[in-house]
Image: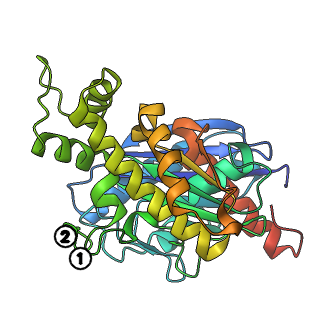
Amino acid sequence: MHTDLVAALDIGGTKIAGALVDGDGTLRVRVQRPTPAREDSETVMAAVAEVLAELSASPLWGRVTALGIGSAGPVDAAAGTVSPVNVPAWRDFPLVERVRAATGGLPVELVCDGVAIAAAEHWMGAARGHDNALCMVVSTGVGGGLVLGGALHPGPSGNAGHIGHISVDLDGDPCPCGARGCVERIASGPNIARRALESGWLPGPDGDATAAAVAAAARAGDPVAVASFERAAQALAAGIAATATLVEIDIAVIGGGVAGAGEVLFAPLRSALRRYATLSFVQKLTVAPAVMGNDAGLVGAAAAAFAARVAADGAVSV
């Protein structure tokens, strides 16, 4: 890994974060702005420009050699455009071109946020030392990224590993993506809560009806809450096992708010995985919680930028 600095952007529906990151994965400078997600495209870009301006004001900026972007998707890395579902004004928005112009022509590497998190967990987190891994975020949505053969595998468009939209229930509920029975439609936080409510679970006196509240109820033994998490775990296990069978990963790392449920999620997930990952070459597949936390997107965007620079220099990939 190079020891110079790269800049990183983590762009989502609620925040736009930026950082200067060194070759050890340390965030040397960090800034953040709220995402004006319901505003027009130029207002959103203005928030990105503010983050870049603050980063470029740092005395360390002169050492920056590249910039990585992890963006909510879908993205099109080949075209340099983004169309985040949670930022309606950005449709085929030329983010790479605009960021490159705002930074004086720095090389820019674009990946989706799930791929960025995979890069972070492989570089510094729970997938470190694993050459073949799936890293997932289970939160408001379900996303992911792949490491194959020891290197990040973003795919031609930057979206590879998007496990949330693998169909695991052929006659299941329609998903907003247009398919049916997607992992996300069953295992995301809002859908865990939705299923629990539809099955008769009642929130407590505070009215909290989130997946976190369902997890607390499951921890206390509420059978409907337990069943909702078991259903989510089954969907995740089916998607993970399918991925492992296709590309021979040996670890699945899971982060995001739903993973915060701990063994309420992980215990039934491991149990279900034993039923789905049955072929000899996937039976040793393990599942682990992510460890990189809230800055995973920034660290991963930086890792993607470092990897692109190493590849451009003709060296071994990180």
Residue 279 appears at what percent x and percent y? 63, 69
**Mark 2, secondary structure of its residue:** loop
Q: Nearer the viewer, residue 27 or 260?
A: 260
Q: Which mark is residue 178?
A: 1
Position of 239 compared to 140: left or right? right
Position of 238 compared to 246: left or right? left
The reply to whether residue 257 is in sight is yes
Q: CA distance from mark 1 to mark 2?
A: 7 Å
| Residue at the far right in the pictured view | 315
Residue 242 appears at what percent x and percent y? 52, 70
**Mark 1, secondary structure of its residue:** loop
| Residue displayed at 22% across by 62% down | 40
What sort of colour scheme is used for the picture?
A: rainbow
Tell me which corner region of the image, top left, top right, bottom left or bottom right, holds residue 241: bottom right
Q: Nearer the viewer, residue 60 or 177?
A: 177
Q: Which mark is residue 174?
A: 2
| Residue displayed at 27% across by 50% down | 36
Residue 13 appears at what percent x and percent y? 33, 51
| Camera-nearest label, 1 or 2 | 2
Residue 225 appears at what percent x and percent y? 25, 35
How would you rate the neighbour count of disc 2 (Cα within 10 Å): few for under 14, some for 14-19, many for 20 or more? few
